[in-house]
Amino acid sequence: MLATRNWQLRKTMAKSKISYFCQNCGYESAKWLGKCPSCNQWNTFVEELVVKEPNKLPDWRSGTDALKKANKAAVIHEIAYREELRIKSPDKELNRVLGGGIVAGSLVLIGGEPGIGKSTLMLQLALNMPGVKTLYISGEESEQQLKMRAERLSQFSQANCYILTETSTTHIFKQLELVEPNLVIIDSIQTLHSAHIDSTPGSVSQVRECTAELLRYAKETDTPVFIIGHITKDGAIAGPKVLEHMVDTVLQFEGDRHHMYRILRAIKNRFGSSSELGIYEMHQTGLREVSNPSEILLSQRESPLSGITIAAMLEGIRPMLIEVQALVSNSAYGTPQRSSTGFDTKRMNMLLAVLEKRFGFRLSTQDVFLNIAGGLRVEDPAIDLAVIVAIISSQQDIAVPTHIAFAGEVGLSGEIRAINRVEQRIAEAEKLGFEQIYLSKYNRKGITTTQYTIEIKWITKVEEVFEALFG
């Protein structure tokens, strides 16, 4: 009799075990490994106590998945397509980055450095959504702290925003059933813990389980959920890599805390382009949208200076004019320095090799510094032409006229290659009052130059640019 009772007691008790998880990709192992067999990273396994309940509820509510109707395979042309229901927010920059608005039932992850403004951005969104009931869940700040921040940000007398300071997912889902919000914000995912996993908040298993529960809630209720995530010292979002695969959209909030401009960049987006960015300006009263970034990215100079050029670039579908700054000086040490901010250093070294090999500029004994003004990080190859012109302008100490813009990719033989969406770049330069723009001759097909007031210089090689600017 006693043995039967003990057997039943052991059967109903939760089963616990020790597992090892890779902090990089979330791979689970029964023993510690030096190298992860999934992502090939070394010394990333951490020990965690995992408790698996026999009667664990697979759903976020007190129900079961067995009652749901199983999906059936369907022929692709028989599937009825419907447009995603999007919620338009007053923040036009956020709408652009998300692909046109907040998609119902989507799970959005926002990462960024501490103090960069992630919580400020999300609290502004919660306070400025007319007609939308929002629930802001914070595991890092108290209700009084959030109230003080809200008073500093905006007038929230008409805001239908609820504040909840909680870290347990069980209590959070109970409040979600009571409030029934149209938008949920979690700050942050590393502070939540689930009763199904017996490990500390922020661990690999806890982050994965909490995100899975929020994902089920978002999909089953068609409620968009924003979750804020911490980042590591390397700039990657903390937690397992599977976290980025689970969510629908990954946004990166970037910028320098010592500067006023912030950049919201889409890294992954299942509902739009993953190459969009939004620009904000940090004020004492919160974040302000920058509708025309070209004006703020071009410094006001009273006279032309050597080493400065203007490049017409594209970020997603948005054309922008940015300022490229270069400084070339004699090396005071044996090894010349190569440093770039906002531009790929390897690509800069390639362009320097082209200048030395093809055109005879002796740069191997000189220090070269390159900077993209405004704190931007640029990957568009169309700014190659502006980069090499800025470098030669600094070396020869000859200023480039301020009314000239450049757009072109430079090949290894010194040719100017064609770029995409050249009409948008021309229109942006013309709108800002530039008089000339240098473009590849291979972009000339299909473009009517008479519709523009700006003078277009069609070139095929870098020598043509040097002859026109430096003689």
Image (cartoon, helix red, strand yellow):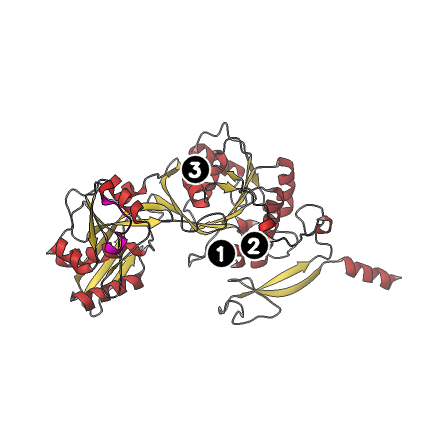
Horizontal side, residue 255 vs residue 312: left or right: right
- Say above or below: 455 vs 246: above
Check disc 2 and report the residue beneath it: 207
The number of callouts visible is 3
Instruction: Report if the CB atoms under discs 3 and 2 are less than 8 Å apart.
Output: no
Q: Is residue 149 above or below residue 14?
A: above
Which of discs 3 and 2 lies nearer the camera? The answer is: 3
Between the C-alphas of marks 1 and 2, the distance is: 9 Å
Please, what is the three-letter code of the amino acid marked with disc 2? Val
In terms of depth relative to the viewer, which is nearer, 104 or 425?
425
Q: Amino acid at mark 3?
A: Asp
Callout 1–callout 3 Cβ contact below 8 Å: no
> Which of 426/279 is in front?
426
Q: Which residue is mark 1?
A: 238
Q: Amino acid at mark 1?
A: Ala
- Residue at the spot of label 3: 91
User: How many neighbours does mark 1 have within 10 angstroms: few (below 14), some (14-19), or many (20 or more)?
Assistant: many
Along the line of sight, which residue is nearer the eye, 128 or 14? 128
